[in-house]
Image: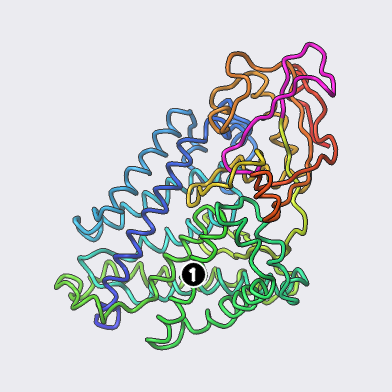
Amino acid sequence: MDWFTAPGYWLGRLVFQRALAGVYLFAFTGAALQFRALIGAHGMLPVPRYVRYVPFRHAPSLFQLRYSDGLFAGCAWAGAALAAALAAGAGDLVPLGAAMGMWAVLWLLYLSIVNVGQTWYSFGWESLLLEVGFLAVFLGNARAGPPVLVLWLLRWVLFRVEFGAGLIKMRGDACWRQLTCLYHHHETQPMPGPLSWFFHHLPRPLHRVECAANHVTQLAVPVLLFTPQPVASYAAWTMVATQLWLVFSGNFAWLNWLTITLALSAVDFTGIAGPPPAAASRGAPLWYVVPVCGLTVLVLVLSRHPVLNMVSRRQVMNRSFDSLHLVNTYGAFGTVGRIRDEVVVEGTSDRVPREDGDWREYGFKGKPGDLRRLPRQFAPYHLRLDWLMWFAALSPGYARDWFGPFVERLLAGDRDTLRLLAHNPFPDAPPRFVRARLYRYRFTTWRELRETGAWWHRRPLREYLPPTRLSQASSAEPE
């Protein structure tokens, strides 16, 4: 079946699969290291409580059948080990069916985590990893040529990621149409990186060029993915360059890296790859052709809702239309904040919590806190608590289900929660009271940086959570 495979894309498939396995490795490792405090049996939003109220059909997961922290840890570390093996090339050393099974296990394990992850796993890149990971099951290995249909389906995902993001910007905040959003974005994005301060201080005309280039890359270039080579490759490389710009300018977990991975699957490496291995030039077996054709029909049918969403004036970002996250809609930064507020969490061991008492600040790993600390690079690793703290500062409504349990665990000195933080000001015994205050943050100017050594400037706004003791924490809500 010569029509079924594209042997010349063997190197593109190899690069795509190794990179995707690397993204899976970060995802599973992050889940293993953070889950106990977030969704563990004694976490802020426990899985056992969640699955009691959410039926299997709405959130299919292995943990609907049975949950324990040990089982979750075992699944997460097993996923990380399998991802590492696939990144090292193990998928090409086994028969085609076994390789498909390995990718299917990865997808099933991560689906099981996402579907019980609740607020902590509500990000668009979770669904994107699952959608791309499901397609990877059918991409085959070195024992068969890359299936043309799956290669086109990967381009279809990439098109929706970029084009959906471009549409939501043009329909959303007026600053995208006025080319002024990047006057603010580098400063107000959820988790700035080590170069974000410098990006923010680029000349404003260059920020306007950034905006214009973004529109071209997201609204015009994606259409070229469906044109003949080498034009499709040029389009893909343009997306790679744009995504690398985003990698350098901020921390967006694995979103940019996964988009780069998708773009590389559209590149024709024939000119540098040489002839395909002999095994990849052989025809595909019928038992492989049939499910790939079935997958194509399934994706086309399920694409109805994402397409209708893209053409709708009420377009929404990052939504799954099925519980398996097979075909989703994407988008990012339909609105851009002009100001940056941060929730600062403090504790005291004073018996009476006075305003001028001995309040000590907890430090987070990624989100801004210490004014003299240059933002750090964590992506593609995902700091879930830090990201949710950014949403908490936007509105208390984003934090009502988990902020009280978070404070409760600080007051109890919970080790798993404290491991999520960069600095615990109470190493010997937990504080008697914890409070939270809202501050307005901004990047310092060049002059302020030279004079103070501070990357940030802040001023207090208001109380976010009044002083709270352990007996009150479980019902505490931010204001």
Where residue 32 appears, x then y in whole percent? 45, 37
Q: Which residue lies furthest to the front in this view?
A: 451
Q: Crowding near pointer 1: few (<14 within 10 Å), some, many (20+)?
A: some
In the image, the segment drawn in magenta is 346-368
Q: Which residue lies furthest to the left in this view?
A: 278
Residue plotted at (37% across, 86% down):
230
Q: What residue is shown with label 1?
A: 299
Horizontally, residue 61 falls left or right of residue 219, namely left
Q: Where is residue 111 in the image (x, y as percent from the top left)?
A: 48, 49
Q: Is residue 55 visible?
A: no
Residue 141 image-quadrant placement: bottom left
Q: Can residue 313 be seen here?
A: yes
- Above or below: residue 232 compared with residue 144: below
**Magenta stretch holds residue 322:** no
The quarter of the picture where residue 479 lies is: top right
Residue 384 vertical placement versus 10 (above, below): above
335 sits left or right of 79 in the view = right
